[in-house]
Image (tube, coloured by chain):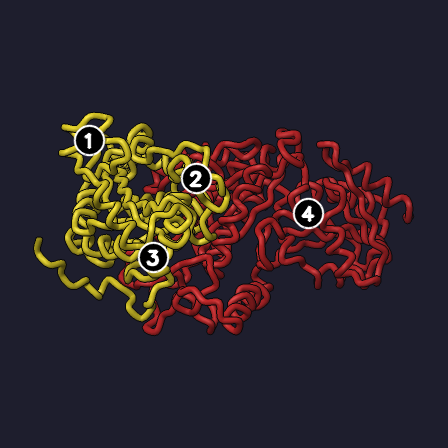
Amino acid sequence: MPDVKPVLMQGNEACAEGAITAGVRFYAGYPITPSTEIAEYMAEKLPRLGGVFIQMEDEIASMAAVIGASIGGKRALTATSGPGFSLKQENLGYAIMAEIPCVVVNVQRMGPSTGVPTAPSQGDVMQARWGTHGDHPIIVFSPASVYETFYLTIAAVNLSQKLRQPVVLLLDEVVGHMREKVLIPEMGKLMVEKISDQVPPDWKPYDDKGLTPLVPFGSGHFYHVTGLYHDEFGFPTGEPAVVSRVLDRLHNKLEQYRHEITFTNYIGHKEPRVGIVTYGCTVRSARAAVKKAYWQNRWPVGLLSLQTIWPFPDKEVEALARQADIILVPEMNRGQLVGEVERSVRGQAEVVPLNRYDGEMITPDQIMEQLRRWLP
Amino acid sequence: MAPIEQLNLDFLRTKKLPHIWCPGCGNGIVTAALVRAIVRAGYDQRDVVIVSGIGCSSRAAGYLNFNTLHTTHGRALAFATGLKMARPQLKIFVIMGDGDCSAIGGNHFIHAARRNIDLNAVIINNYIYGMTGGQHSPLTPLGKKATTAPLGTLERPFELLELARGAGATFGARGIAAQPRQLEQLIARGAAHKGFSVIEALSPCPVAYGRRNKQGGAVEMLKAMKENAVSVERASNMDAQALAGKIITGVIFTREAPEFCELYYQLIEQESKKNSN
């Protein structure tokens, strides 16, 4: 057994510590509530680990610097909240197009605009999916606890490296600021999934054949990186056949590795009548409701929590819909992911949204109240 | 003057030529001066990186045979800052246009200057947004015409090198496409300088700027540029009246100040010593 140490940690700290554990050695950011603790933690730790922390002049520059550092061979991460996430979108799209690994953390707060900076929200679900322009793919994780934040950050960094694809971590103010016990095996030990140190002899920076490592600038392999559509060597092209092939390849990467990207968890009745589908901090309230409804009352209720929200876990949701008559979707917004749930359910169950958007969490009682509409 | 030598073709992606620039454009001259400056500096090809933004001039990166990074509009210096901090041994040249650097990229420009990070910014100033067809930029002279200033712009331009100096850059030089040998020397001096170096390279855009402002074709524009050029040494003996409308060329300022990347890595070293003790 590895030495597992329980540590009391804040969600934002767990994110930073997870990043460091996954080998992140570059952070660029700009102060914004409620994500600033991530930057402060990195500023404290990184120089001591031989890494670089830099507070940039704005959110746009932070995203750009992270991409630049990644091309230089450092694992890189930035963190922000809604307004900053909006500003990062153009360069996030650049990283998707140029296939530069990086992790972007958005600790969600109540929007739109400056909104309520200190209040939690799940309002950026669709922005995380479609924030940058163009028909791009994206990976988005949404942890429900400090523990999940730690491990999903590690997964985000490693997957981003492997797939050469930006990963977004959608935290929320609740998860970011709460303190919880985290079990960390061998604190300080790296959990880095090594891709490959070897450059294949016929290496191309954008190989159509599948995953190909990013060879850092300065290693003697001269190639071009651009946000324009490009050929296998990175040079701009507008050739229709190449353009569609590049976009397909970007999407295919995620489809091919769906099993490594998709994290979901199910608890509750084996054949539920009511299935709850939710993500992020709302999972906590749903879990409390299921404890009462299923473990205490033995009602046929189950909870499918989604740690991965994009690409949307449609197969997992559909499997639940085959069992359940009702799918309840609590979200701290006016209904964003519920549309995806409906699409995946394909009429096999009734999909019922439960929304709250006043800057407060959805409570277990609110969920229980809904469950009583159909149960016992 | 000695004839100019053959370009080092190893540093060019000759298969990517011909370039996309219009006939009479000065971007090719500035790009060649950059290549010669890199040869002059004696850098290992593997250590050189070209970063560029968006616009006509930024397409130069695609023709240069190094690791080249063609970024988003205005953000080249921010990408370059991350790259330099991740890999300090790299010799980074950042090619930008006047709009790219001083309008959308203005914030990154002043902050790169403030940090005095060891990057070499080469701003190709043709007074206009060329790629989009001739809109005025923050460097378009007052009163000149552009598609978005059909009656002449009422906006005062930046004095780019004064802006750089005020923001903390430690090397500033101006050259012109009409004097490529001097331009090459200025870029090489900027490269040798530790800290943030700014080289403003004036370059004719006969298509989107010259024609609209009745400045003739490329030849006339280059000629006028040359006639108006005054070296910094000569300019020091001229009064304001004599200098009106002149282009002052040469090293406009140079000074010593702590360089950000070096400071940061000294900190890392200091911390690692503390930890090992």
- Residue type at mark 2: give it: Ala
Of the chain colours in the picture, the one used for chain B is yellow
Q: Which residue is mark 2?
A: B103
- Residue type at mark 1: give it: Glu
Mark 3 secondary-structure assignment:
helix
Query: Residue A331's spot in the image, x, y percent?
Result: 74, 43
Residue closer to the observer: B33 or B116: B33
The answer to whether marks 2 and 4 sit on the same chain is no
Q: Residue at x 58, y 37 (%)?
A: A83
Q: Is residue A53 visible?
A: no
Of the chain colours in the picture, the one used for chain A is red
Q: CA distance from mark 3 to mark 2?
A: 20 Å
Tag 2 near tag 4, CB within 8 Å: no
- Which of label 4 and label 3 is nearer to you? 3
Q: Which residue is mark 4?
A: A279
Query: Residue A112's spot in the image, x, y percent?
Result: 67, 36
Mark 4 secondary-structure assignment:
strand
Q: CA distance from mark 2 to mark 1?
A: 27 Å
Q: Which residue is mark 3?
A: B61
Q: Which residue is mark 1?
A: B256
- Give the left or right position of residue A38, taking residue B13 as reference: right
- Give the left or right position of residue B161, taking residue A345 as reference: left
- Give the left or right position of residue B60, taking residue A56 as reference: left
Query: Residue A353's spot in the image, x, y percent?
Result: 81, 47
- Residue type at mark 3: give it: Ala
- Mark 1 burial class by Cα count in 10 Å: few <14, some 14-19, many 20+: few
